Amino acid sequence: MDARVVGIPEVDGTERVAVVIDVMRAFTTAAWAFHRGADKIVLAADQDEALAIKAGHPGWLALKDGAPVSGFDLVNSPGLLRDADLAGRTVIQRTTAGTVGALAVVEATLALCASFVVAGATARVLRNAGADAVTFVATGEDGRAAEDLACAEYLDRLLAGERPDPGPYVHRAGNSPAAHALRAGRRRGAHPTDVGLCLEVDRFDFAMKVGLEEDLAVVRPLRTGPGAVSAAHRAR
């Protein structure tokens, strides 16, 4: 499979199959939201749009980067989200990079949101779709985020039919500037477990597909396995 990696500024609308990667933390948080029962995630371009969408759907929950803000119910942290009860709820997600990247490719034939926690499932969806080319959109730092590039390279190896050791890729991600910033407490709206949760590989057995539904960009889980994670993960 032919693959290329671009940053958000290089997205040009020609992408037929795209995987938008935000390891720390948008699409790790999104995966946790689905694990905690969310029905769907609606992506917003900015804070004002997120609040406008919520105003039209008062029962939906709004989530954003950074510290809690009036009008928002959740923050972009897997550690803070993993105990939330989101059963049947719709979450509106707005982040600095991940949601922006997903909105840029929402009209692609197949667009997936990814991070390490759904890497294997993401690769299975791409293989099952018979895609012959894929564009990886590394959202952090205009395409230079070490954790997103590591995840893209890991996915590329999976798509080549290999069984790579995830260790070196996770190590690179864990030593990225974003990981150091989170560990040092330089990111507001964070939890001490965020980095560790972002570095789990195949924590979940679903991919995350984004597409347009009634003029909204909507992410839904796309299950690729028998519906159960490993016993070790269930025990956590």
Image: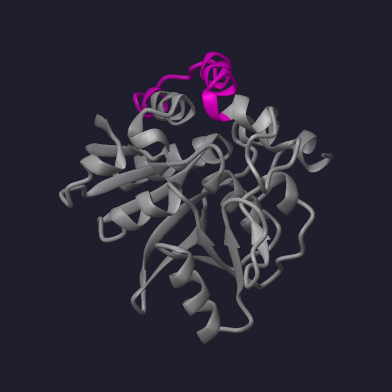
Q: How is the image coloured?
A: one colour
Most foreground residue, 58 or 170: 58
For this view, does 217 lie left or right of residue 167?
A: left
Most foreground residue, 118 or 84: 84
Q: Can the viewer see residue 1 in this picture?
A: no
Q: For the image shown, how many numbered marks are present on the structure?
A: 0
| Residue positioned most to the right | 235
Up-down relation of residue 33 to residue 175 (above or below): below
Where residue 58 sits in the image (x, y, percent)? 61, 84
Where residue 209 sits in the image (x, y, percent)? 43, 56
Where, by quadrant of the figure, is residue 131 drawn?
top left
Q: Main secondary structure of the magenta part?
A: helix
For this view, does 4 lie left or right of residue 143?
A: left
Q: Can the viewer see residue 101 in this picture?
A: yes
Q: Residue at x 40, y 27 (%)?
A: 149
Range shown magenta: 156-178
Question: Does residue 16 show up magenta in the picture?
Answer: no
Where, by quadrant of the figure, is residue 155 drawn?
top left
Q: Quadrant of the C terminus?
A: top right
Up-down relation of residue 187 to residue 62 (above or below): above
Q: Residue at x 47, y 43 (%)?
A: 114
Where residue 202 sits in the image (x, y, percent)? 60, 35
Where, by quadrant of the figure, is residue 92 drawn?
bottom right
Q: Residue at x 42, y 19 (%)?
A: 162
Most foreground residue, 116 or 139: 139
Up-down relation of residue 52 to residue 99 (above or below): below
Up-down relation of residue 123 to residue 216 (above or below): above
For this view, does 200 lie left or right of residue 8?
A: right
For this view, does 181 lie left or right of residue 13?
A: right
Q: Quadrant of the N terminus?
A: top left
Where residue 159 sits in the image (x, y, percent)? 37, 29
